Amino acid sequence: MMQTAGNKAKVFVVIPNKNGTAHLSYSLPSLEKSTYPNYSIILIDDYSTDDSVNFVGVHYPCAKVLTNNRKKGFAGAVNTGIAYALERGADYIAVFNSDIKVIPNWMELAIDVFDAQPNAGLVGYTEIPKENESLFYGVKELKDNVEYKNVKGLPGCLYLCPASVFRHIGLFDEKYYMYGEDNDFFHRLMKAGYIIIQTNVPVWHYGEGTSNNKFFTTWLAYRNALRFSIKNETIWQVVRMILALFNQGCNPFLRKKTCNPVSKRMRRYNILVGFILVIAAILWNMFHIISTIKLHFMYNKHKHHKMRVV
């Protein structure tokens, strides 16, 4: 997989936004300190009702703002930005959440990894939760001591991907709306023969900064976990996923892992609400079972060919 070498490679930073003024007020200043010389910022607004579009226009006129005319969710907003970047000759595309902070040389460090690992389809970072912000600020600028390893998944708040990968395997599955679309993309990427690499380069993440409706995000977490399993796994794995969801939502002896954002999201409510969420997730997926199974067979039949999923 050949990419433009060094700082000649064009990076498009895709930022989905939904009523995110409070978060953009710290994420964009952090991004603006990036030392890589050849990048563009694309902010995709997903039908916001706050002042975020005007805020970006006034304070960050260098950012290109695209607006969706209807709510498309995180996956749909990211797809809008990726399509825009591909049309303009991007070499790399960064998916950049609006509620994160980065160190100045985060882009070039990832590009160096791509240069060293030609089979890499995705390079990600080490997530620092908002409770540990001091750890993020305590990290000195990384230069030659970047460490990385092969993984099966990454924190979805920030990663860098060659444009050629999107052209090969397609974009994000918008049916997820929000949560799970990244895991689905990672799975397809590895099926196509790429590897995923996580670095020790830190990124601070507020978490759930794009949504104020915590119940909705929890519902999506349950719904989409089951959809991913139906779409990508065997029937026995689907059964195991259903049991795992009941365990997450209804097991009174299961302790919530406060350092794990997924655990915190799925153990947000009591056992009764957890049970209702699992049942609702099953019913939603039964209603959409035909379209999901079609994707399952299409994907497994053509896993090494270009597929555009929108």
Image (cartoon, rainbow, N blue to C red):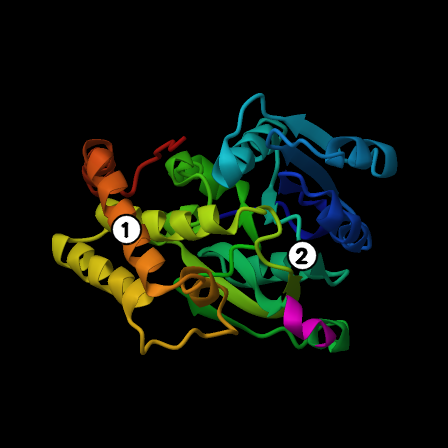
Dot label at residue 226: 1
298 up-or-down from 227: above or below: above
The type of residue carrying mark 2 is Ile
Residues drawn in magenta: 130-134
State the residue lying farthest toward the right: 58
Label 1 crowd (10 A; few <14 / some 14-19 / many >=20): many
**Nearest the camera: 245 or 239?**
245
Q: Quadrant of the C terminus?
A: top left
Tags 1 and 2 touching, CB below 8 Å: no
Left/right placement of residue 135 relative to residue 16 reads: right
Answer yes or no: is residue 218 visible.
Answer: yes
Q: Nearer the viewer, residue 4 or 82?
A: 82
Crowding near the residue tagged with mark 2, few <14, some 14–19, many ≥20 C-alpha atoms within 10 Å = many
State the residue position of label 2.
Answer: 100
Q: Nearer the viewer, mark 1 or mark 2?
A: 1
Task: From the top left corner, tell me how far across and down residue 264 is, in percent.
Answer: 47, 66
Give me the residue at 54% from left, 38% from top: 78
Alpha carbon of mark 1 to alpha carbon of mark 2: how far? 28 Å
Which secondary structure type mostly characterizes the magenta part of the structure? helix
At which x and y percent is residue 281? 29, 47
Q: Residue 28, image x and y in percent?
A: 77, 48
Picture residue at 67% right of the left edge, 45% below the top: 9
